[in-house]
Amino acid sequence: MTDATIEVTGLRKRYGSTTALDGMTFTAGPGRVTGFVGPNGAGKSTTMRIILGLHTADAGRALVGGRPYRSLRSPLRHLGTLLDASALHPARTGRDHLLWLARSQGLGRRRVDEVVEQMGLVSASRRPAGGYSLGMRQRLGIAAALLADPPAIMLDEPFNGMDPEGIVWLRGFLRDLAGQRRAVLVSSHLMSELQDMADHLVVVGRGRVIADSSVTDLIAAASGDRVRVRTGAARRAAEALSAAGAQVTHADTDALSVRGLDVERVAAVLTAGGMPFSELAPHRATLEEVYLDLTREAVEYRAATTGAAS
């Protein structure tokens, strides 16, 4: 298998007075799923289109296996992509759509049949693709991305339209691809899916990288030294823990978030005060919490809060 690295270095792009990319730099390496996330308008789509040579950067470079995508003789053999699941001829059957792509890369019918089966599209493959559900079109798009067995895969919002069973299947499937030493770059707004699947996360906002780290490290940093407490005596517990030097906030009616004391010290304070508790554990941040905190200042389009004046 050839070099699977997707490398983006110093990409800059302007559309008139709008800066779409402002030095975008990251690498999606082999053997891992890299999540590519950010608010609307952050530059994700522009970056992926530049990687594919569909847009031209004002500065910087994007390489696939050390080479520009446009210079690759058989590009689908190097990078498989899904940017728009609806970009197909609606009257053409799913199988014919794949056969058309296969011929462009010198591939035969056997490979088409393999990916059709792999994606669970055997029963639908001879029907016009225009009648496919969004989830089925996503599967067909992923089949097309895998057609030439590339070492790198780049998918934009592949979970859109998938039912719960499809999401579970796709999550495991992408993990398997990374396990084969492929580079898997996935743009998604579904943090819950990336938390269970991604090894690495590239968070972007306003055209630049905000964070570039392993999911484990990002969650550990966001979790900090907080302890979650659930007790029927939340007010008394908060007062006692504050007196012991903790910073305490109410997470909900009977739950507290405690910072500054470890689990053992929190337990000792509550026990000494005769306050029972049903939950006491170190806080583990979710990837959604991490994402919202990192992108708080980078959201370009924000809805008004409830109760705002009309």
Image: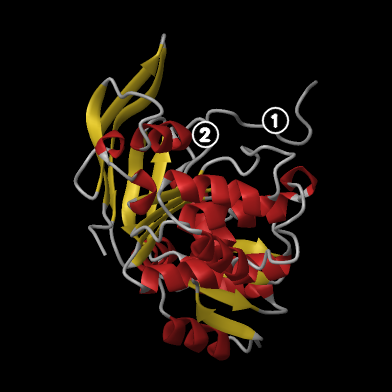
Q: Secondary structure at mark 2?
A: loop
Instruction: Please identify the quarter of the rendering in which residue 249 is found.
Output: bottom right
| Secondary structure of the residue carrying numbered label 1 | loop
- Amino acid type at circle 1 is Ala
Q: Where's residue 221, x and y in %?
A: 36, 63
What amino acid is found at the position of numbered circle 2 in the picture?
Val
For mark 2, what is the residue?
299
Is residue 227 left or right of 211 when viewed as pictured?
Answer: right
Q: Is residue 199 left or right of residue 38?
A: left
Name the disc covering residue 234, or none.
Answer: none
Q: Is residue 246 visible?
A: no
- On the image, the x and y values in percent for residue 183 come to 34, 59
Q: Quadrant of the C terminus?
A: top right
Label 1: how many Cα within 10 Å (few below 14, some 14–19, many 20+): few
What is the quadrant of residue 277 in the picture? bottom right
Residue 29, compared with residue 7, is above or below; it is below
Q: Which residue is mark 1?
A: 304
Image location of residue 21, percent across then percent down: 35, 27
Report if residue 177 is visible in the image.
yes
Q: Quadrant of residue 58?
A: top left
Write the residue at 54% across / 89% down.
272
Of label 2 and label 1, which has the lower sequence position? Answer: 2
Residue at image point 34% right, 64% down: 182
Of residue 165 and residue 90, the one placed in the foreground of this image is 90
**Viewer-closest of 244 and 84:** 84
Residue drawn at point x = 59 percent, y = 76 percent: 229
Above or below residue 301? Residue 27 is below
Residue 295 at x, y percent in the picture: 46, 42
Residue 113 relative to residue 72: left or right: right
The image quadrant where one finds the N terminus is bottom left
- The number of callouts visible is 2
With 294 as the anchor, is 253 left or right in this view? Answer: right
